[in-house]
Amino acid sequence: MALTSVLVLGPTGGFGQFILNDLVRRKSEFKRIAAIVDTTREVSKTKAKLLDGFAAQGIELVRGSPLDAVVYEGFDVVIAILGNHAIKNQPEQIDVAISAGVRHWYPSEFGADLTVPGNWEERYYRDKALTRNHLKQRATEVEGFGYTYVVYGRFTEWAPVPHFGIYPKQGKANIVGSPDMLQSLTPVKDCASYLVSTLLIAPEGSERTFRFVGGNYPWSEIFQTLERVQGKKYDVLYKPVDEARATQKKAIQSGDVDLELACSHQVIQGTGRTLVPAPYDNEKFPHIVPASLETAFRSMFEDETMRTTLGFNKLFSEIF
Ligand SMILES: NC(=O)c1ccc[n+]([C@@H]2O[C@H](COP(=O)([O-])OP(=O)(O)OC[C@H]3O[C@@H](n4cnc5c(N)ncnc54)[C@H](OP(=O)(O)O)[C@@H]3O)[C@@H](O)[C@H]2O)c1
C-alpha cells in the first residue's frame, strides 16, 4: 500500500518546509498530512507563523513530544527531517512510533550515499549510521515495519555556502578538493518533489533506497555558473584534504561540534564521496524535470521568498 497518512517530524527546518509545501501541492493524493509541533522546544514567532501557514493550507498540526506515542497514532509513515544535532534522537523516536502503530520511517538523511566506501566511518554521518543500524534491527523484530533511504548528494542551493568554504557575498572560496571533482547536485524543490512522489509507491520488503540526481558538476562549472549569475569573479583556492582533517582534530579538542561536522563534511566532499553512484531513479518519475544549475542559483540569489525559505537571507541578501 502507498504511504498516504504522513507525519512530518521537523516541519519548519531548511528541508522540512519544502516537503510540506510539496505535500500541500499534492494534498488530494493523500489521506492525511500532519506536522509535529514539538512542544519540548521553543516555538519562535517565525516558526509559529510557518506552522499557522501550513495549518491554513490544510496541514494537521499534532502537538506534543516526539517521544510521546499519542502523536504518532493513525499514521502510516513518519518523515524525519531533523537537523544535525537531533539526528541521534531517532532510534528512541522510532521505537515510540512503532509502539503507536507506525510501519514506515524515512530517516533524516537526504544527502550522500552512506554505503560509498569511507562514508559510514565519517563523523558527519555517525548519527545517520546509528539510525540505519537501528532501523535494520527493528525491521527484523517488527513484522511489516520498513524504511526508505532517499539519497541526493547535495541540494544545489546548499553547495555555495560557508559550511563548504564558499562566500558568495565576498566572491571567495576555499574548496577542499580540486576543480575537476564532481559534485552531485539537485535543486531542493525537486528533491522535495521526488521524495513526496516516493510515498505514493507501495514499499515491497522492509528496506528501499531511491537515488535522485539533478546533475554531476565539476567545481569549475559550479564557479563559472555562479560568476555568470552573480556577475562577479570568484577568487577560488583549492585546499588539500589533510588541512580539513587537521582542523577537524582541533575542533574535537576544543569541543566545537559544528566545526567538527563541517570539516568532516569537507573531507567527504574533497575525496569525491558526495558523488552519488549510478543508477539513479529519476526516470521513475518522468513528470519531475530537475532545474538546471543556473536556474537554481538564479532563484536562490534573486527570489527573496526562496532565500527566506532557505534561511539564506543574511548570506545572500546584499548580493544584488
Ligand atoms: N543534501 C543536502 O545538501 C542537504 C542540505 C540540507 C539538509 N540536508 C539534510 O536534511 C535533513 C534536515 O536538515 P535541515 O537543514 O532541514 O535541518 P534543520 O533546519 O537544522 O533542522 C530541522 C528540524 O530539526 C529539529 N531540530 C533541530 N535541532 C534540534 C535539536 N537540537 N533538538 C531537537 N530538534 C531539533 C527542528 O524541528 P522543530 O521545527 O520541530 O523544532 C528543526 O526544524 C538532515 O538530514 C540534513 O543532513 C541535506
Image (cartoon, grey):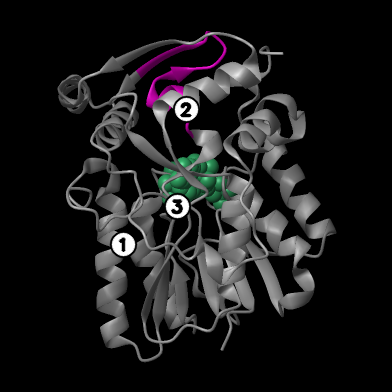
In-front residue for pair 101/284: 284
Secondary structure at numbered mark 1: helix
The quarter holding residue 206 reads bottom left
Mark 3, ligand 1, within 8 Å: the answer is yes
Picture coordinates of residue 143 (x, y %)? 36, 91
**Magenta region:** 159-174
Q: Residue at x 15, y 23 (%)?
A: 242
Residue under label 1: 131
> Which residue type does callout 1 highlight?
Thr
Of callouts 3 and 2, the N-terminal one: 3
Secondary structure at numbered mark 3: loop
Left or right placement of residue 304 versus residue 260 in this view: right
Label 3 crowding class (10 Å Cα cut-off): few <14, some 14-19, many 20+?
Answer: many
Can residue 124 be spotted in the picture?
Answer: yes
Of callouts 1 and 2, the N-terminal one: 1
Residue under label 2: 221
Label 2 crowding class (10 Å Cα cut-off): few <14, some 14-19, many 20+?
Answer: some
| Residue 187 to residue 67: above or below | above
Q: Quadrant of the N terminus?
A: bottom right
